[in-house]
Amino acid sequence: MRRYISIATDEQLKCCLMNEIELEVWVQDDLDLTSRILEFDTLVLKFPEGYYLRANIELRVQNNFLRGVPRIS
């Protein structure tokens, strides 16, 4: 069984964007894309491969992506 974290908040998306974390884009329980996010707003996510409506997808990352992010003192 693969462990993943669901990404839903703007803060999580911003962290993934700033740290160039690869996201899995799931559409109706099917993996559609694995890529890095380029930008986002309240309705749309932009990837190099195209655009997705946030309401139509589920975003996931493998394991805990925060472990690899350096701590700010």
Image (cartoon, rainbow, N blue to C red):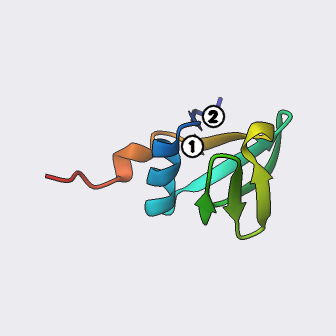
Q: Say which residue label 1 marks.
A: 62
As rendered, which of 58 and 39 lies closer to the eye? 39
Q: Is residue 73 left or right of residue 30?
A: left
Question: Which secondary structure, mark 1?
Answer: strand
Q: Is residue 55 left or right of residue 7?
A: right
As rendered, which of 63 and 37 lies closer to the eye? 37
Circles 2 and 1, Cβ within 8 Å, touching? The answer is yes
In this rendering, does residue 19 appear at all? no
From the viewer's perspective, is residue 60 above or below residue 17?
A: above
Q: Which disc number belongs to residue 2? A: 2
Identity of the residue drawn at 51% across and 40% down: 63
Q: Residues within 10 Å of mark 2 (few under 14, many from 20)?
A: few
Q: Residue 36 at x, y = what percent?
A: 61, 62
Q: Which disc number belongs to residue 40? A: none
Identity of the residue drawn at 79% across and 65% down: 50
Q: Residue 21 at x, y = what percent?
A: 52, 57
Q: Is residue 41 left or right of residue 34?
A: left
- 2 vs 1, front mark: 1
Q: Which residue occupies the extreme bottom position in the image?
A: 48
Q: Residue 54 at x, y = what percent?
A: 72, 43
Question: Which secondary structure, mark 2?
Answer: loop
Q: Residues within 10 Å of mark 1 (few under 14, many from 20)?
A: some
Residue type of the residue flagged with mark 2: Arg
Identity of the residue drawn at 63% across and 46% down: 42
In this rendering, does residue 47 appear at all? yes
Q: CA distance from mark 2 to mark 1?
A: 8 Å
From the viewer's perspective, is residue 73 above or below residue 12?
A: below
Residue type of the residue flagged with mark 1: Gln
Q: Residue 56 at x, y = what percent?
A: 81, 39
